[in-house]
């Protein structure tokens, strides 16, 4: 199963809410309404990074594509 690394650039995020409306399985608002990865997929380092699998990859990629400031990256983990 393919794994994907998801990152949110919180400095770029404008807290518009599109990503966590589009893909609540992967993204949720933090205390400032900026995006973060839900705890299920979150990396230990911080809320802005996580690793997901194929089951939610399409929705994460849709969220990335609809973010108005390109703050989300989704890349395949080698
Ligand atoms: S869609 Fe982009 S700008 Fe909007 S909350 Fe998500 S990461 Fe932030």
Image (cartoon, rainbow, N blue to C red):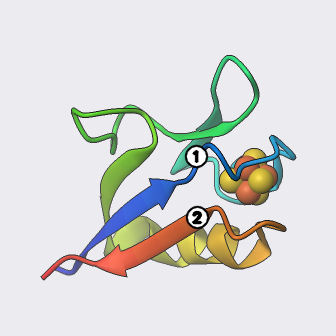
Q: Is residue 13 left or right of residue 58?
A: right
Measured along the vertical axis of the image, is residue 53 above or below residue 28? below
Q: Report which residue position mark 2 lands on.
A: 72
Front position among marks 1 and 2: 2
Q: Residue at x 35, y 33 (%)?
A: 46
Q: Residue at x 45, y 66 (%)?
A: 56
Q: Is mark 1 within 8 Å of ligand 1?
A: yes
Q: Report which residue position mark 1 lands on.
A: 27
Measured along the vertical axis of the image, is residue 38 above or below residue 9? above
Q: Is residue 68 visible?
A: yes
Q: Residues within 10 Å of mark 1 (few under 14, many from 20)?
A: many
Q: Is mark 2 within 8 Å of ligand 1?
A: yes
| Residue 66 coordinates in the image, percent (x, y) | 78, 73
Q: Secondary structure at mark 2?
A: strand
Q: Within the image, what quadrant is residue 39 found in?
A: top left
Q: Within the image, what quadrant is residue 5 found in?
A: bottom left
């Amino acid at each position: 199963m393919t794994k994907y690394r998801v990152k949110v650039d919180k400095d770029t995020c404008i807290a518009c809410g599109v990503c966590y409306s589009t893909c609540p399985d992967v993204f949720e608002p933090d205390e400032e309404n900026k995006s973060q990865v839900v705890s299920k997929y979150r990396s230990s380092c911080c809320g802005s990074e996580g690793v997901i699998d194929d089951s939610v990859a399409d929705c994460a990629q849709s969220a990335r594509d609809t973010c108005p400031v390109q703050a989300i990256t989704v890349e395949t983990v080698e």
